[in-house]
Image: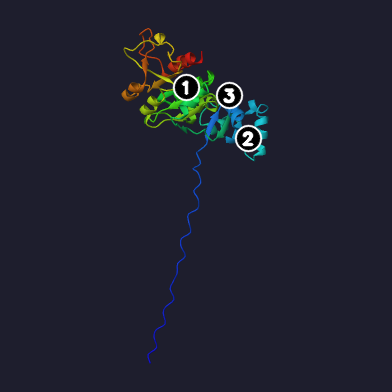
C-alpha cells in the first residue's frame, strides 16, 4: 500500500490592516504682525494663536496674551528688534508678531444668500482681485464699515488670504467671513432673489451717482473685478446692472481697493 502524501498546510496571510484614519491637513500658520491685527486675533479667536513674539515696547501690554498662551502651554518670547525682524520676514512688524492658523475660506452655498438678507447682512463681491495687498485693504474697509460678508470668485487669479493680505488688513480678517463661489456667473445670477448685483466697470455705463435704490427693496451687492482686466464678460452678463465711477479723466481709474471703499460707504449709509 502506497502512503498518500500528506497535504501541506495552507499558508494563511493576515488581511492587511486598514490604513489609519487620515487627519485633516494642518495649514501652515501665518505670521500676523502689528498690534491692531494681533489684538484683534486675541480678542476674536485666541485659540488659533500658536506662538507670540514681541519687543520691549509691548512687554506690559502683552501680559494677558502671554497668560492665555501659558495656560495652553504655547510659547511666547520677548525678543530683540533684529530677531523680531527675522521672525516677521519684514521690518514692517510693528513690534509684535503672532503665528496663528488663518481663518478658513468657506464654501459658498446659494441657500446662504436668503439667510444673509433675512439677517440684514451687507455683501461685497470680488471677481478676480489678484493683488493680496488689495485683498487686505478691501477686507480692512469691509471691517471698518461693518460689512462682515465678502464673496470671492473661482477666478484663476483671485487672491486668497495670505500673510501679505493679513498685514494690510490690520485685523479685518478677524471680523469678516470670506466665502468662495464655484461656478461664479451662476452664483451671481442666483443672488437675484435676495440681492441686486451691480458690477463696476470702465466704459460707457451709467455713473454710480445715478444708481437709485432697488425698487423692490432688495439690498445692493457690488461686484469688483480684476485690477487689470476688470470683470469677465460672463460675470458682467450675470449682473443686473453695471456702473462706472466717473472722475476727472486725468487718470484712467481708481485702484480697486479705493473703489471698494466708496461702495462700502454707500452700503453702510
How many residues crowd mark 3 within 10 Å: few (<14), some (14–19), many (20+)? Answer: some
Q: Residue at the far top: name it.
A: 248
How many residues crowd mark 1 within 10 Å: few (<14), some (14–19), many (20+)? Answer: many
Residue 1: image tag: none
Residue 4 quadrant: bottom left
Compared to 237, does 99 lie above or below?
Answer: below
**Which residue: 50% across, 50% down?**
21
Residue 77 quadrant: top right
Foreground disc of the pair 1, 2 = 1
Q: Is residue 140 left or right of residue 232?
A: right
Foreground disc of the pair 1, 3 = 1
**Front-most of 172 and 170?**
172
Mark closer to the chain start, 2 or 3: 3
Counting from the top left corner in percent of width and height, residue 39 is at: 60, 27
Compared to 179, does 221 lie above or below?
Answer: above
**Which residue: 64% across, 36% down?**
69
How many residues crowd mark 2 within 10 Å: few (<14), some (14–19), many (20+)? Answer: few
Q: Secondary structure at mark 1?
A: strand
**Which residue: 33% across, 22% down?**
237
Q: Residue at the far bottom: name it.
A: 1
Counting from the top left corner in percent of width and height, residue 201 is at: 35, 17
Q: Which residue is mark 3?
A: 36
Q: Which residue is mark 2?
A: 77
Mark closer to the chain start, 1 or 2: 2
Residue 40 visible here: yes
**Front-most of 204 and 34?**
204
Residue 123: image tag: 1
* CA distance separating discs 2 and 3: 19 Å
Amino acid at each position: 500500500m502506497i502512503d498518500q502524501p500528506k497535504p501541506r498546510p495552507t499558508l494563511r496571510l493576515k488581511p492587511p490592516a486598514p490604513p489609519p484614519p487620515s487627519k485633516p491637513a494642518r495649514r501652515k500658520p501665518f505670521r500676523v504682525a502689528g498690534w491692531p491685527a494681533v489684538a484683534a486675533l486675541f480678542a476674536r479667536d485666541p485659540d488659533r494663536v500658536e506662538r507670540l513674539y514681541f519687543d520691549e515696547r509691548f512687554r506690559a501690554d502683552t501680559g494677558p496674551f502671554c497668560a492665555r498662551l501659558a495656560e495652553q502651554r504655547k510659547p511666547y518670547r520677548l525678543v530683540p528688534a533684529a530677531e523680531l525682524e527675522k521672525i516677521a520676514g519684514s521690518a514692517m512688524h510693528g513690534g509684535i508678531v503672532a503665528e496663528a492658523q488663518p481663518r478658513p475660506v468657506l464654501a459658498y452655498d446659494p441657500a446662504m444668500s436668503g439667510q444673509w438678507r433675512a439677517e440684514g447682512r451687507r455683501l461685497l463681491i470680488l471677481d478676480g482681485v489678484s493683488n493680496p495687498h488689495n485683498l487686505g485693504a478691501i477686507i480692512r474697509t469691509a471691517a471698518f464699515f461693518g460689512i462682515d460678508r465678502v464673496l470671492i470668485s473661482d477666478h484663476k487669479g483671485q487672491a486668497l488670504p495670505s500673510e501679505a493680505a493679513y498685514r494690510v488688513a490690520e485685523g479685518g480678517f478677524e471680523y469678516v467671513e470670506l466665502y468662495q463661489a464655484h461656478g461664479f456667473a451662476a452664483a451671481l445670477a442666483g443672488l437675484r432673489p435676495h440681492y441686486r448685483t451691480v458690477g463696476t466697470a470702465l466704459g460707457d455705463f451709467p455713473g454710480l451717482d445715478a444708481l437709485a435704490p432697488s425698487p423692490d427693496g432688495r439690498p445692493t451687492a457690488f461686484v469688483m473685478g480684476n485690477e487689470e482686466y476688470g470683470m469677465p464678460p460672463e460675470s458682467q452678463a450675470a449682473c443686473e446692472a453695471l456702473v462706472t465711477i466717473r472722475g476727472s479723466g486725468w487718470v484712467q481709474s481708481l485702484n480697486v481697493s479705493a473703489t471698494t471703499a466708496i461702495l462700502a460707504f454707500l452700503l453702510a449709509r
